[in-house]
Amino acid sequence: MWRSARLFRIAIQYSPRTYNPHRPGKRPMASATSHRLPLDYNVIKNDERYRQLEKEWQEYARNGGTDKIIQGFQAGVVDLLNEIDLASPVSDLRSKATSPPTTEVNSSEKVLHWVDLVLAGGALLGIAHVGYIYALEHAGIRFRAIGGTSAGALAAVLLAGLRPKPDAPAGTALLESLLQMPVPKFKDGAGLDKAVGDCLIGLATGTYTSPLNWLLLPLFPVALARIVAKAGIHPGTVLEKWVHGELEEKGAGTLGALKTKCDLKDIVFEKVATESHLKSLQVPDNGQPLEGLVVAVSADVTTGSKANLSWKRDPAVNNSPVTHSELYWADPDSEKAAQCVRASVSIPVFFQPKIVPAEKGKTIPNAGELAKPLNNKWATMGFSTTIPDQVRFQDGAVLSGFPINLFHVPPTEPVRCPTFGVALSPPREKKKTSNLLELLGATIMTATHIQDIEFIAQNKEYEMLTQTVDDGNVSALDFNLPIIGKYVLFYNGVLAARDFLMGDGNGRPRFDWAKYKHHRANISAANRRGPNNGVGNGSARLAQVVGTPTQ
């Protein structure tokens, strides 16, 4: 193990990239913390030192030595973690740690800072979320509400289910699940369909495909007909069963059990004293109870709705967001939590849609009735016609790949804790649209990201709250990604979290909770003084306050 750690630490020093996560086009200036650039998978996979490390890790994996691989991953990021120092609070919700001391709480007093967390989709790039979460937990940050789309939903649900209790860290458990995740087996379609699908993915992404698969290409019309009939290649059964097994082992197999694990009633929170110069701008607390929450965002393509899937919530709690599980299950709390993940990760064509209910003869609640007279949550989704017998869910990224608005607090209300967002897509750049395939690709990217982009553009405060993890040139659909490729994403996730909390030395300052609250207070004051109280209006006023353009 120690040989692995030493080799890994040495190899890290010789694989810097020539650009940073924000892609500025030149090497950034040095910062107060030691500056490191993200790892590049295309570089290190051809480096003999990393090939040797991969062989060693593969040997551990074959012989049940996952713990040694975990130690190697952790050894490779220890210097980054040691540079994280929360000199000031990052939230107005704090508590004392009640769990036994661990290396994932970097504070002599074990003070925990609570935030909300939103994780973007990105298929296998979601491995980077584990690194980001691991670094936040090391800094003493814990999570009140967690949500995400697709891979982000998977990470969110596992984070909530694997931790023993809400104030306990789960980073190491998440990392263990990541390393033991049977990714190749998630391709559980019929042999011919799977082979043709692998060829298409290989062509589209440049990833490895077995030469034997190409021999089946003459049967492409047959496979295509089967894929069309089933509305996708892979049933996704293996993935759903694996997620359920991980959660069930930790006592969180059902939505009701997951709800219990996220209950905050035993956490004693200490509200950070408000700075005196902000007191006149503060809005009184709305009196809502503090609620632990997990949300998986999916696309109900049968009714054309964005579905926020969670457990059944107390109707007296009016906290954002509205969740919709009661529309699809008569007793959501008795359903497997893995169903919500499966619904959110249903990548079109790759996975067959998640059908609810799957059993023949069963229907969703109120099937066959008109939705409008019911005056229930269908109305909040804008659906008013006949409720179908069953629905089909596709990947939540079809509608919102980065649902950063999940836990948005209107400008007229105080923010108890910030919503940290973790994106996996680089900033927008000019797309190639010279042929049909390029045009289709650009169209899909625009359709799946525009809502989230517009929300951030209209609510400038989220530029202070979100961070993008560099993907390290890893393909999102490389289901044969070696362990070293997973490490690239994990390392880049840790690095992105460090840069977010401490500043990146290239123009982005460290996250400043006091400054963020000041901005929010000015939005609130401007909205109360102004004739209109819309979110966009408050954001425009924030732009005036901080000198940021609103377009």
Image: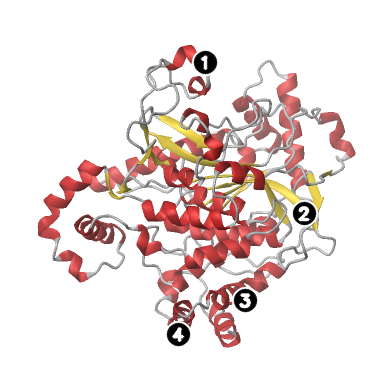
What is the secondary structure assignment of the residue under circle 1?
A: loop
Q: Secondary structure at mark 3?
A: helix
Instruction: Indicate the position of residue 128 as horizontal and vertical percent values.
Output: 52, 60
Q: First in sequence: mark 1 or mark 4?
A: 4
Of the residues under marks 4 and 2, which one precedes in the sequence?
A: 4
Q: Which of the two discs, 3 and 2, labels the residue nearer the N terminus? A: 3
Give the structural element (helix, strand or loop) at label 4.
helix
> Which quarter of the picture shows residue 140?
bottom right
As helix, strand or loop, the secondary structure at mark 2 comes to strand
> Which residue occupies 53% across, 39% down?
334
Q: Is residue 35 left or right of residue 341?
A: right
Measure how far apart labels 3 and 2 are at the Cα level: 24 Å
Mark on residue 489?
Answer: none
Q: Nearer the viewer, residue 508 or 248?
A: 248
Q: Residues within 10 Å of mark 4 (few under 14, many from 20)?
A: some
Residue at the (60%, 59%) spot, across then down = 132
> What's the amino acid at mark 1?
Asn
Q: Residue furthest top?
A: 373
For residue 49, above or below residue 22: below
- Percent x, y for residue 317? 68, 29
Question: Mark 2 — residue?
Answer: 112
Which amino acid type is shown beneath numbered disc 2?
Answer: Leu
Say the numbered circle drawn on residue 75: 3
Tell me the amino acid under the disc marked 3.
Ala
Q: Quadrant of residue 192?
A: bottom left
Distance of label 4 from label 2 (alpha carbons):
39 Å
- Kind of residue at disc 4: Gln
**Could you tell me if residue 22 is visible in this image?**
no
Cβ–Cβ below 8 Å for labels 3 and 2? no
Residue 471 is left or right of residue 447, and the answer is: right
Residue at mark 3 to residue at mark 1: CA–CA distance: 55 Å
Q: Nearer the viewer, residue 29 or 88?
A: 88
